[in-house]
Image (cartoon, rainbow, N blue to C red):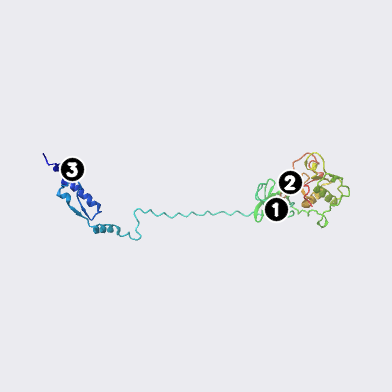
Amino acid sequence: MPNARHKHAKSPQYARRVIPLVLASGILAAVPVGVAAWPNGSDDLPAVARMTVTVDPLRLESVSRGLDERPPLPRGTRSPTAAAATPAPTPTATPTLTPTPEPTAIGQLYVTTALNVRSGPSRDAEVLAVLARGTEVAVTGTTEGSWTQVIHDGVAAWVNGEYLSETKPAEETTTAGGGISYAECASGSAVEDGLTPDAIRVHRAVCAEFPSVTSYGGARSGGGEHSVGRALDIMVSSSSLGDAIASFVKANYRELGVSEVIWSQQIWTVERAGDGWRWMEDRGSATANHYDHVHVTVYGNSGG
């Protein structure tokens, strides 16, 4: 019967496979190579399997240090993977702006009422300033509809040409000494029945300043400002008288509490004072178009 020990003996080729594995680890300084137990409890290994391999730790450390102590790249040397430098941007030429030519004046006109100066020929254009009555303005001769181009602060602007005149307007009429009389009207005060305090002030002030006027229209039914005592009609016998009364009331609108004046088919309001007198649509008759009376609307009780 063959010897059982020979049945499990390992060949020298097996030992040659084990030894490189031990050398590659480098963990132990001296490693006894062998097998703890062969199958069937045999410890009869070939002589080559019981050899001792010695690894010098200092030699391994020297090799490792040599890898870490490689000289650095010379200063200024670029890595092969460094990105190429970004080229400098090409400067863009700044366009030359052509200056806007300054407007040229061809004449002078006068403002006939407080008048808005606008940035364009439209009521929607920005209001740049408000010119007082009697202000002299330079005009360029350019018009667009009812709008006239003027020179304001050295630049072209626009005003409503309907309120420009070749002659300077007279000073607006006020009472002597700048005061307004609120004494009862000599011709009677029956018209004051139903009027608000502001409307009464207008009646008495006009009556004192223009004693020739004897006919007024006050509160009445039918709706509108008259029905609530906030309007007064001042009947006139001539356009010059109507002009004077309209001018007087407008000049004293703050003290009298006036919000609106209608005369000779034109309207002036506090809200749009900068637009001056504005034309109204044709209503078909002298009375409806306010050619025979000055219509005054008040706030109610804000004057004085």
Label 3 and label 1: CA atoms lie apart by 121 Å
- Taking the image as shown, residue 33 lies to the left or right of residue 70, namely left
Disc ID at residue 278: 2
Callout 2, which amino acid?
A: Arg
Quadrant of residue 135 in the image?
bottom right
Q: For this rendering, which residue is in front, 124 or 187?
A: 187
Q: Seen from this angle, which residue lies furthest left?
A: 1
Camera-nearest label, 3 or 1 = 3
> Are there few (<14), some (14-19), or many (20+) residues within 10 Å of tag 2?
some
Which badge, 2 or 1, is on the more N-terminal residue? 1
Question: Residue 39, how many percent across, how many down?
Answer: 19, 43
Question: Residue 163, how many percent across, how many down?
Answer: 73, 49
Establish if 37 lies above or below 94. Answer: above
Quadrant of residue 79 in the image?
bottom left
**Residue bearing the label numbered 3:** 40
Q: Secondary structure at mark 2?
A: strand
Label 2 and label 1: CA atoms lie apart by 16 Å
Q: Residue at x 17, y 49 (%)?
A: 49
Which badge, 3 or 1, is on the more N-terminal residue? 3
Label 3 and label 2: CA atoms lie apart by 128 Å
Which badge, 3 or 2, is on the more N-terminal residue? 3
Camera-nearest label, 3 or 2 = 3
Callout 3, which amino acid?
A: Asn
> Are there few (<14), some (14-19), or many (20+) residues within 10 Å of tag 3?
few
Q: Residue at x 21, y 53 (%)?
A: 31
Establish if 136 lies above or below 235. Answer: below
Callout 1, which amino acid?
A: Val
Disc ID at residue 130: 1
